[in-house]
Amino acid sequence: MSKPIIQTENLRFSYVTAEGVAPIVLDGVNLTIEEGSFVAVLGHNGSGKSTLAKHMNGILLPTGGAVYVDGMDTTQEQLLLEIRRTVGMVFQNPDNQIVANVVEEDVAFAPENLGVPPEEIRRRVDDALKAVGMYQFREHAPHLLSGGQKQRIAIAGVIAMAPRCIVLDEPTAMLDPIGRADVLRTIKQLNRERGVTVVLITHHMDEAAQADRLVVMAKGKVIADGTPKEVFRDVEGLKAVGLTVPDTTQLLWELRQAGLDVPLDALSDEECAQALKTLLTR
């Protein structure tokens, strides 16, 4: 079993408002993310999933409980630089992360600020751009790229910092289906081929289904945690908190409601098609 890279222990968090009222956003979250894993965190707006993401590299600090990154307590200010080197963040809007007028200069920005030597920066920039399939655009202006391409540049900028874990907070929210597919492919390759731990925050069922592990949040709590097949099998439980399930699961669930004997964990299109074929050829 891999060692944990992120741990939350009874994590609680409240945003303090101007009126002094502090609604609870995270309510006792206990979570362990193992190194090298690909974990999706699924939930509605207001479930606490983005707030949880911002705790994973010390952007937000706990109101109660604790967060540890590779054993480092995020409340220890002297450890924050090392924590942020370990866990990189990619946000919803790539325009907020792109700072330079040329793609390769943008990807070099963070390593330069970390004091990485110039020849190592060159190697990291080329490597990061190749990893996201954007090397041929290295001399382009970022603002001329598509949304999906910009997001891949933002991911390359984080890869160039050489983090062991990347947390992506709704990275496809502003993208069209082609851009979403490109970014998802990039994320999966980073995890499978480079062993980078990936935490994907999303409200898209189809994205969540591609992770190895799925954590579902509602009202600041973890309400389900398991493989996507295990979690999506509980159709009623997810519907009770206003979440849907992938189309394949929905179809099989409706067939089961009608009294037909089909499995609920045939998650991919291929598995679902095979389950239907088996049903029809009995």
Image: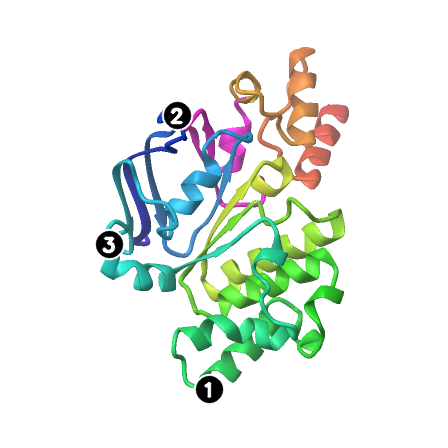
In terms of sequence position, does the residue under pointer 2 or pointer 1 come before the other?
2
- Say what secondary structure mark 1 lies in: helix
> Which-is-in-front pick, marks 2 and 1?
2
The residue drawn where x is 67% and y is 24% is: 250
Kindly indicate the quadrant of the structure image that contains residue 107.
bottom right
Magenta stretch bounds: 209-234
Q: Is residue 220 above or below residue 169?
A: above
Residue type (three-letter) at the residue carrying disc 3 = Gly
Using the image, tell me which numbered label, if any, was put on residue 19.
2
- Say what secondary structure mark 2 lies in: loop
Look at the numbered discs 2 and 1 and tell me whether their residues touch, using CB distance below 8 Å.
Answer: no
Q: Total number of numbered labels?
A: 3
The residue drawn where x is 44% and y is 45% is: 53
Give the camera-side residue of 49 and 188: 49
In the rendered image, is residue 246 in sight?
A: yes
In the image, is residue 47 part of the stretch drawn in magenta? no
Using the image, tell me which numbered label, if any, was put on residue 71.
3
Q: Residue furthest front?
A: 18
- Say what secondary structure mark 3 lies in: loop
Residue type (three-letter) at the residue carrying disc 1 = Pro
Give the camera-side residue of 257 and 199: 199
